[in-house]
Amino acid sequence: MEGLEFSGFVGIISLLVILLPLLSFLLILAGQKGRGADLALINISLTFILSVYLFSLLWNKQPFHYQIPWFLIGGIEFKAGILLNNLTVLMMILVSGISVLVHIYSRIYMKGDPNIHRYWAYLGLFCFSMLGLVISDNLLLIYLFWELVGFSSFLLIGFWFTRHAASQAAQKAFIMNRIGDIGFLLGIMIIFSQFQTLDISALFGDNGLMKESRISEGLWISGSRQIPEVWLSIAGIAFFMGAMAKSAQFPLHTWLPDAMEGPTSVSSLIHAATMVAAGVFLIARVYPVFDPFVLNIMVCIGAFTAFMAATIALTQNDIKRILAYSTISQLGFMVMALGIGAYSESIFHLATHAFFKCLLFLAAGSVIHQLHHYRDKLGLDFDCQDIRIMGGLRKGMPIAFIGMCLASAALIGLPLSSGYLSKDAILITAFEWAETRNGIFKILPYLLVLTSWLTAFYISRLVFKVFLAQPKLISREQTEQIKDAPNQMSYVLIILAFFCSFIAFSYNPASFESSWLWNGFSSASIQKVNIYHWLVPLILNIGSLGLLFTTYKIYVKSDGISIPDRNLLYRFSKREWYLNEIYSYLFTVPVEKFSRACYWFDRNFIDALVLKSASLVGVLSGITYWFDRTLVDGLVNATGTLAKWIGRFSRNFQTGKLQHYLITMLLVVLSFFILTYFI
Amino acid sequence: MIPLSHFLIISACLFCIGLYAVLTKKNAIQILIGIEFMINAAVLNFVAFGRYDKENGGGQLFALFAIVLAAAGVAVALAIILNVYKHFKTIDPSKIDKLKD
Amino acid sequence: MLSLLIFLPLVAALLILVLPSRFQQQYKYITLGVSLIQFVLSLFIYLKFNSSSLAAGISKESQYQLVEKLPWIRLNLGNIGSLEIDYFLGIDGLSMPFLILSALVTFVATLASWEIKTKLKAYFSLFLLLNTAVIGVFCALDFFLFYIFYELMLLPLYFLIGIWGGIRREYAAIKFFLYTLFGSVFMLLVIIGLYFSVINPATGNHTFNMILMMDPANYSYGSIFSAIADKNLFGISARLLAFIVLFVAFAIKVPIVPLHTWLPDAHVEAPTPVSIILAGLLLKVGGYGIIRICYSIFPDAAMQSAWWIGLIGVVSILYGALNALAQTDLKRLIAYSSVSHMGFVLLGIASSTTEGVSGAMLQMISHGGLSAMLFFLVGMIYDRVHDREIANFRGLAEIMPQFTAFVIIAFFASLGLPGFSAFMAEAFSLIGAFTSEQVNGLLPRWMAVAASIGILLSAAYFLWTLQRMFFGQTRLKGGEEWLSKLSDVNTREKFALIPLAALALALGIFPSLLFDKMNASVLAFVQLISG
């Protein structure tokens, strides 16, 4: 009895958690425009408080599962429900916590926008769907929220819809995500047809159907259902495809840099901290479905994405674009970690990344925001996001500078930062994992190390160029007039900065194994190799520090070392590996052409066939009409005409002249004679 | 002895002349004369063939009969011609085409 | 009850005909009133509907609900027996949802008829006649009666398109008329064949009763469509041939590729309310006919041709979507998207699984509401500026924010955003198609995979349109003049749009509203066809 009450209570609270943001969405749309900001903030704060409460209630406890019947198809009942385990409650406070901060931040950042109420509404919708995604207990519900997240991201990217680039980016984001969604849907189809249920705990629980199913003689068997083994791999790839799109993994990553067209606060919340982590979350949720083959693919794609995005970030000049590629790169780390079975390391990195990447974006946002004001005040014209025109902002904006530095340290993985714990955890595990592999998998950890160094380079380039370098367009005096953003924004940066340090995650700054978060999840058992535990961080950090120093020399001191920016590699990186062009050439344009061809075919072939057959009938009827008129009717007319003609001929004989008659008589008589003579 | 064929040739000539007159002349009197010619051609034939019927004299008898009839016919014809003239003010048969509908 | 539902509009049509023309401004209120009453009645039916498995309907006459059966035509034909045609109405889980849909769509179409300004008397009486016919089709259980209602739909539609349509209205009307007539003429042959094959065991007479046609035991031995005799016609099995003929007749309505070309023309030329009825109801008659008649009467032939039907479904989905992508006229785009969406119906039915058939049914209801909404929205723009060319509009979101909100709802609902009915429908059609290979081996799995690409394409064309027409800086072809004409949504239009959006949302979040009511019937149907 008590248990029932407890479950009802937790159920109601978790429902409240997701419904409060929805409520603010609905209320704002229903007309509470003026109070949008307060409404949204109150609701999201309540959500956060409730999430923290749930977290304290359920962290490292028995998972909570509560279901109600949803609908019935045939003999199969679908249930809607809430599943709260460690992963869920962690994601809940992560999402709601960062949302609260972003809400506070946005009050200033978005001030003065005429459509601000829509902004709050969309944020509410996003929080609703993201939290719903997190707590759902079956794949269909997850899919539902999964797409709703995509939809709210569409709305927010396209928030300034009058800008062509923004609406274009929103469209691109949604469609690329749709590609992943189709994979997800396919995965659902396979799972459903195999197990007749989509309930996650029934499928992937400890004694779930997935574990019970077996593979024999090329068939994947579960109960009475069976399906060729290859579909297991396809299911894995399908789910992974969903994750790839949402978490911006190669080759479905190109939407994320474009998504930076949205407001920066949105970028930090959705496209850095929370939504893009949904892919990783999904992989984590359906983890048992992946067979070794798919896991290997995941490792390769994750590592490759991490590397590729880092190389692109090296040469970008748009501050948000650099951060976007950095996000892609870090997500690559997480995906790779999941692929090698480093489940907890991945989730750990997800959590730390959420904070430091959010901070990076928000700090960048305050730079952009202040520059914007400055530009409008002086009536100048420059691109507020271009790091080439920035420089020397450290003096005026110390808080942003420090925040950025701390976040960058975490991103690079310098000691005492949160990133040091989580990122090095991934790298160490990767090395340990590679011990037992051979071939290309041996190289992958080294690729990650290289990527980490690249990370150190591009992020320090960004920080140095923005804050320390000599200003390019504006004089130093002018630059110093650009002050830190208003307090409300700065407080948010300070709070986030706290979460970039190790303190929030572990009492021991050197060992990820002492982190409460890491211990909350269990990883696949990988043989522990002690040497890596100090060697890898050491090498990494020495390399990173070296690079930091080099970057400082190049961009701040500018003493002669310059980056060659004309060669092939540079352009390759600058143009983002030409992937947009390639996709456009390979997919967008052909599809468009193909659709035109289809329409042409439809008009000129199918419809023409119909019209031709119609005109054929027309021709046929023409022929019968002609036949009718000339032959059938003609015959009748011909008899008449003949009679008339004969009549007219014989009338010639009747001239009324005696002698003519006589001649006729004579001729007739004569002809009789002649005839009788001949016959 | 004159052979029969001579008579027949003469009679045929007479008939043809008469026929020609009937068909071509523009004067009703002349047509009447043409008819007389043709009748007389027939009469000549009667007489000529009468040679083969000496006992009864059938040829001569018929010849006489035909002459009488011809005379009567001429009388009637002349009367008609007179009436036609009265009516149409002409005796040119090609101008009298009231038989045409 | 059903008779009331069917003949109420007819009575109203007569009323309109007798009313003098000076009341012509009141005609639309009469029509609106009728459709409201119908809606209330159908809601009542929905609430009272018995969804237990003992009231599943399908092939058991005793399980139908609200049955009305009266002898209608009895003619002694000497030694052939006597002609037995009944006035036979009844509903089960597969027809009941359509009653609500019909009432709702008619209601919206009536609201859209406010823009009709000429020949009101003729318009509204034809409109009501159409309404009668559509509801009649969904209720009729006697094949002869069904056919009468089925043909009766054509007549008002022909005039509604031909008189109140666009520039090429005569062309479109004739094309539509001939297309559908082509199908139904052959259908008549099959009906006659069935009549002579089926014997009512109760009376010993031949009968047009559809339910009796579903039981193989009622076919007289040696008759042309008897399953046991398995006669051949033109070298193929007579039952298969009959199935194909009936299928083609209904598939033209659905429509399938390549028998779809009447649809874009008819839609583009038809006035808005008629487009709404066409897309919202007429297409559903096709799908309903396939389920109720083709599949139920000839299940064996249906199983044989399942692969082809599935293929047609997939081709329709992809081909329709690709064509939609290439359109420059908004209304034509939506017409092609209908082709694509109705493909899911075929795919779901072809799978012959409970998931697939439920998905197909839901898709029909959902598409009925959504396409009505889409056409209504297009009609709103067209009524304001008489232009529908996508390229002539840009940045509408700024001048018509509420309108844009409705468009976003309609577009995203149609492209299968979860939370809206179309998603559930398409997902379950696909799941059904995918499961089919395991359950009954009818459809290969790749069909489901290929069809899911259609979902991607539908996102592409809807979003592209959204981006081209609604986002960006406002730029209109008609300049200032259009700017003043393009007013936002008014109250009447909201009354039409909100119920449709609510329907899509309700069915998307609580599909049980529909699934629970028809589950027993779907199970019975699958049982029947898979023998």
Image: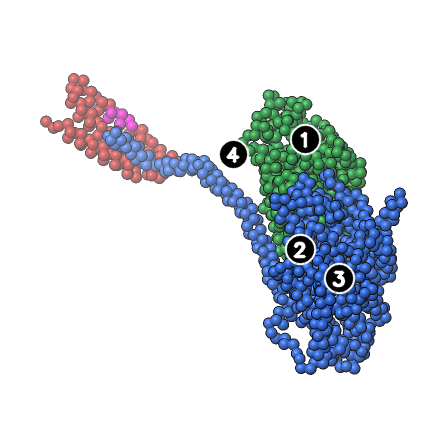
Residue A424: image quadrant is bottom right
Question: Is C205 placed left or right of A8 in the picture?
Answer: left
Mark closer to the chain start, 1 or 4: 1
Residue A264: image quadrant is bottom right
In magenta segment, residue B70: yes
Residue displayed at 72% across by 76% down: A549
The disc placed on residue C211 is 1
- In the picture, which chain is red? B
In magenta segment, residue A627: no
Badge 4 amino acid: Gly
Residue displayed at 69% across by 82% down: A559
Mark 2 falls within which chain? Answer: A
Q: Are marks 1 and 3 in contact (CB under 8 Å)?
A: no
The disc placed on residue C235 is 4
Q: Which residue is mark 2?
A: A295
Mark 1 falls within which chain? Answer: C
